Amino acid sequence: MNASGSTGEFKVPARTYLLWIAIIGLIPLLVIFRQNASNQGRPLSQHEFMQKATNDLIARATITLDPQAPHSRDIRGVYYRTDSDGRRMIENGKPVEVPFVAQVFLTDERLETLLSGAAFESKRPNTLLLNLIWSLGPILLVALLIFFVFIRQLKGAASRQRVEPRKASAEFAGIIHIDPEIVQRAPVFVGTDVPLQRLVDALERGESVDKFLADNPSVKKNQVIAVIEAGKQKMLETLVK
């Protein structure tokens, strides 16, 4: 034991573990949210996208190849803004670019044609993050359920502990009570820190009440007599039963 009286052990509360689990589980969600937020743009319909692709107005775009949706493609990129005559608008010597998103149905032939151009590239969805979310989701849910059940049990136990001393005090008012801060919740004589067990041990050794009172001056004689009488009454009730 060190000078401060502690054992030197470092214990991490259960709430801290759950907090770290929640943080780790949120990381993939934040990554996906950031990616989606950074790629947001003006939504294009199938007709608008095909028109711009046909007229070579797509500056650059990425087509997501999702095996679960072989023909419905998620496309994100930028296109060139045009004037009323269909010509590219120029500002500061550069074409004006507009971010866009589109959900387009593409046949394999059309997809191959687009990817053969310099403006288009393909990618596959990040299944690792999705699998990680699906894997951590149930774990986080179970951990939260355990946490709330555990906390409720602790609160219930604490409330029962608060009730127990009041019951003991009401039954032996002025004689003994149970104080959680005195002698590890052992019954003590009211107004003292003398455990009731000390009187029991003294009587078992054959000591007199006067000697016990002399050794424990904080205890009153009427308290000792009341405890002895209560013990006798309890014994008689047991014999009658």
Image: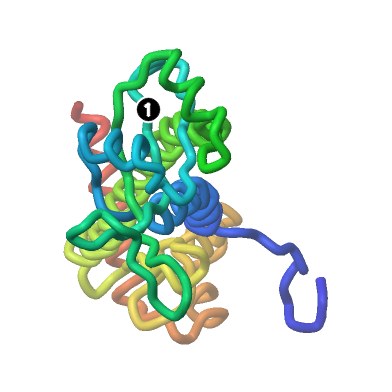
- Report the side of 5 relative to 231 (left or right): right
Q: Nearer the viewer, residue 239 or 89?
A: 89
Query: Can residue 17 be seen in this snapshot?
Result: yes
The residue located at (47%, 76%) in the rendering is 93
| Residue 179: image location, x then y, percent | 38, 70
Q: In the figure, 108 relative to 136: above or below?
A: above
Q: Nearer the viewer, residue 146 or 113?
A: 113
Q: Amino acid at mark 1?
A: Arg
The residue located at (31%, 55%) in the rendering is 41
State which quarter of the image contains the C terminus: top left
Q: Which residue has dot 1 on it?
A: 73
10 Å crowding of disc 1: few (<14), some (14-19), many (20+): some
Q: In the figure, 204 relative to 76: above or below?
A: below
- Report the side of 144 relative to 131 (left or right): left
Give the tally of numbered discs.
1
Image-quadrant location for residue 188: bottom left
Image-quadrant location for residue 174: bottom left
Q: In the figure, 139 relative to 76: above or below?
A: above
The residue located at (28%, 70%) in the rendering is 175
Q: In the figure, 181 relative to 232: above or below?
A: below
| Residue 191: image location, x then y, percent | 36, 83
Image-quadrant location for residue 1: bottom right
The residue located at (53%, 64%) in the rendering is 198
